Each structure stands twice: as structure tokens, then as C-alpha cells.
Amino acid sequence: MTEFIQNLIGNDLLATIIMSFIPLIELKGGIIFARGVGFSFFEALGLTYLGSTAVFFPIFFLLVPILNLLKKIKWFNTFATKVECYFQDKATEIIEERKKKHGDSKLSETLLKQLGVFIFVAIPLPMTGIWTGTAIAVFLGLSFRKAILPAVIGNLVAGLIISGISAICMAIWDFATAKLVLDGILYALFAIALVLLIVFIIKVAKKKKKEPTIENGEEIE
């Protein structure tokens, strides 16, 4: 997988950044790829963190406008509305989970939302990265100022966890063996990402259409 990506793009630095942009793969796959081609711990973490974190801005500001635009197009109306409903439900699920765990605390609802976004993004699994985390922050009604910190800090935590795992692989085995192991993990990530993408599409397709209740940039307490 590593060699295929190297041959396809032709530049390891560019390939690392591009991989960190890909939904579901994000910085997790980017770090594993970067370590497999010889980048150091901090080089791999820095490149993928910057690349994946940059995704926050277009998603936060453009997700709702794009969905609203698609809803005006006959062929995309139903799908766009169902995608919106999916993220609304996901956001509701996360805030309800936080309320159950911290309901007796003095945390405000805004802080519970921020905590929910942070934990969601910090878990280094497919479908829990900054793409989905930012979308959830939008549908939780968090403003830009209150959404960016939990998202980017959560992304950093996820990056440190994956970097730590890759460092352990490098410490246990010689580079050639570690590269094979990391390549296997990369294959697994792509396979899981593909499966989850199919599951996401099926869930969205089955989602009942309903009217949206959240608008981008408006914070709901």
C-alpha cells in the first residue's frame, strides 16, 4: 500500500498531506504512511496534523451552505436532507451521552458540547476524526470560537496516540519489519474506511426525511 501511494503521487511529503485530508483516513492513515516511508516521529505528526486540521475550516463554514444548496437541486434534495438529519441525530446522541455522564456536574451545556466534540475527535478510529467531529460541532450549534479548540486539540490527541503506536512498532522491530506492519495497518484502515463509508451511505439512505432545526454559526444553549 505504501509503495502504491508513493508511485501514485510521486512525492512522500505531498502524499502524507493529501492522505491527512482524506475523510475516514485523515491523520491516522497519514501518520502510518509517513512513518512507513521514513519520516521521523515529529515530521509525521506535524505534517498530518497541519493537513488534517486545515479541514476544519471548510467543513465548519461550508457544510450547511452546501447542504442547503443541494436541497434546492431536485436530484440531491432527499440525500442532502438525510445527511443533515444524520448529523443532527449524531450531535443529539453525543450531547445526551455527555449529559448522562456529567449531568450532576456544574458544566454548562456549551462545555458539555465542547467536551463531546473533543472526545469524539480524540478517539483515533475511522469515522471519529475531524471531518465528522467538525460536522457534529456545527449541528450542536457551537460557534466557530467555541468549536475550534475542542476539534483541533482532540485531533492532536488522536495524532499523538497513533504516533505513539507507530513509534512502538519502530522500537520493537527493525525498519523493514516495522514498515510491513505499518503497511498492514494502512491496508486495514483503508478496508475499514470503505466498509464504514458503505454503512454511512446505507444509514443515510434509510434515514427518514425531516425538517432541519440547526443553522450554521448560531449557538444553541
Image (cartoon, rainbow, N blue to C red):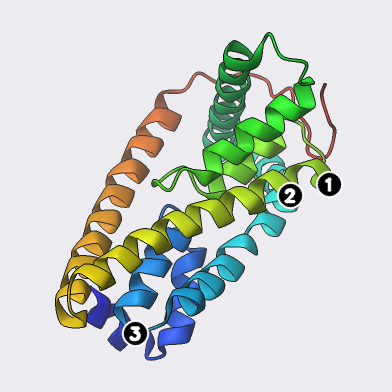
Q: Quadrant of the N terminus?
A: bottom left
Q: Amino acid at mark 2?
A: Ile
The residue carrying mark 2 is 148
The residue carrying mark 1 is 145
171 and 141: which one is in front?
171
Mark-to-mark CA distance, 3 and 1:
36 Å
Give residue 14's position: percent from left, percent from top: 48, 83
155 and 214: which one is in front?
155
Q: Nearer the viewer, mark 3 or mark 1?
A: 3
The residue carrying mark 3 is 38
33 and 170: which one is in front?
170
Discs 1, 2 touching: Cβ within 8 Å: yes
Q: Residues within 10 Å of mark 1 (few under 14, many from 20)?
A: few
Q: Secondary structure at mark 1?
A: helix
Q: Nearer the viewer, mark 2 or mark 3?
A: 3
Discs 3, 1 touching: Cβ within 8 Å: no
Give residue 72's position: percent from left, percent from top: 69, 40
Q: Can residue 148 be seen here? A: yes
Q: Amino acid at mark 3?
A: Gly
Give residue 24's position: percent from left, percent from top: 42, 52
Q: Amino acid at mark 1?
A: Arg
Check the image and name the residue furthest to the front: 171
Residue at 65% over, 42% down: 67
The mark found on residue 18 in the picture is: none
Q: Earlier in the sequence, mark 2 or mark 3?
A: 3
Q: Quadrant of the C terminus?
A: top right
Discs 2, 3 touching: Cβ within 8 Å: no
Residue at 29% over, 57% down: 190
